[in-house]
Image (cartoon, rainbow, N blue to C red):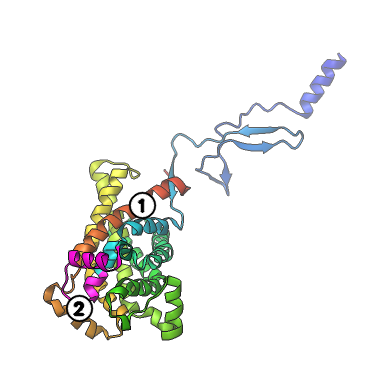
Amino acid sequence: QILKSTHSLCCQINPIRKSSPRNRKKKIDGHTSKKSYKDEKVADRTTSSKLAIRFEAPKDEKIKTIIRPRWWSGGVAGAIAQCFTAPFDLIEARMVVIKKDRGMASNLQQAIRTHGFISLYDGLSAQLLRQLTYTSMRFHLYEMGKEHLDDPAGLLDKVLVAALAGCVAGVVGTPMELINTRMQVNRALPKETRWNYRNVFDGLYRVTREEGFTKLYSGCFLSFMRSSLITISQNAAYDQAKQIYAEFFHMKHDNTLLHLISSVTAAFVCGPIIKPIENLRYLRMVDSRRLINSISYMMRFGSRGPFRGMVPYVLRMVPNTVITFLSFEQLRVNFGYIEIEDDE
């Protein structure tokens, strides 16, 4: 009788809880949370044991996970692509700047015969630094802007976000573009007019000391315009193409084939839009002539002047865009962070 009375007294003080924590919903400010909390460890204050409790969302609620890229993914992807396409970038710059009417093959043979194969990578240090700074910012700002758009976002919204991201990133990339262009055409100029920069840092230091800091932003208007247009014709066009192809061919967004055909589409959209601005930018950064004089010099070859160097540009832009976006997607999938979105 004493044991029975003691047991009944204990039950009155500490009643056994029959409700299970499973399928319980977490409430915040009176609203039901739609997130799933799995295997949360709850410490029991009365004992040192820990209890794993699983909170599951109701079956009528859908949870969507998105893998977001890191801020550096675009820059690393661009640097990888630049290592493969740097020779075409150099040949394109020389075809635009040098007065002689040489074709791509002639410029390529001249560069290798005179200074060796390694000369095709003149300016690589400036290109890599530019990718790691300018391209990182361009991709990151664009991805940040997309997070505030509707899903799926409209083409006009993507274009506006891309234009703003490219313009802001252009502020960072212009000095490296100046040094890169000068290093690429340096060997093709007369000895008395060469700059002979050892690397990108030597170039930045010497331009600042000898010509002033503002010289680093020579042709900045064209650089900002080019940066905005290239972000529109690459990033926005890539996302739009990926959205259209995914819906038409019923493909998943993390499909490598989808990334490939979308990047090729973006590359061919980019070429005709960017090339005239690219040629003017080359001329403004190599010489101090005014914009109207640069336009006049560009037109020395007639109507094909604005598209001078189009063949090496396409040979550079297509593989560069493809490698950049394929690398970017792989970096996103393997090194990105997971974001949970509620989708009813």
Residue 240 screen position, x and y as percent: 28, 54
40 in the magenta segment: no
Disc 2/disc 1 C-alpha distance (Å)? 50 Å
Give the main secondary structure of the magenta stretch. Answer: helix
Q: Amino acid at mark 1?
A: Asp
What x and y, as percent, mark residue 57? 50, 37
Side (left or right) of 43 relative to 300? right
- Could you say which disc has been placed on residue 247 in the image? none
Closer to the camera in the image, 86 or 213: 86
Q: Is residue 150 rendered to the left or right of residue 292?
A: right
Give the left or right position of residue 274, taking residue 180 as reference: left
Span of residues in magenta: 93-116
Give the farthest residue toward the top: 1
Earlier sequence position, callout 2 versus callout 1: 2
- The image shows residue 263, relative to residue 169, as above or below, that is above
- As drawn, the label of residue 99 is 2
Quadrant housing residue 83: bottom left
Q: Position of residue 297 (x, y in %)?
A: 20, 81
- Label 2 CA crowd tier, 10 Å (few <14, some 14–19, many 20+): few
Quarter the N terminus occupies: top right
Residue drawn at 13 percent across, 72 percent down: 304
Dot 2: what SS? loop
Look at mark 1 in the image and give the residue it sits on.
Answer: 151
Asked if residue 159 shows in the view, the reply is no
User: With 245 as the anchor, is 44 left or right in this view?
Assistant: right
Residue furthest to the right in view is 2
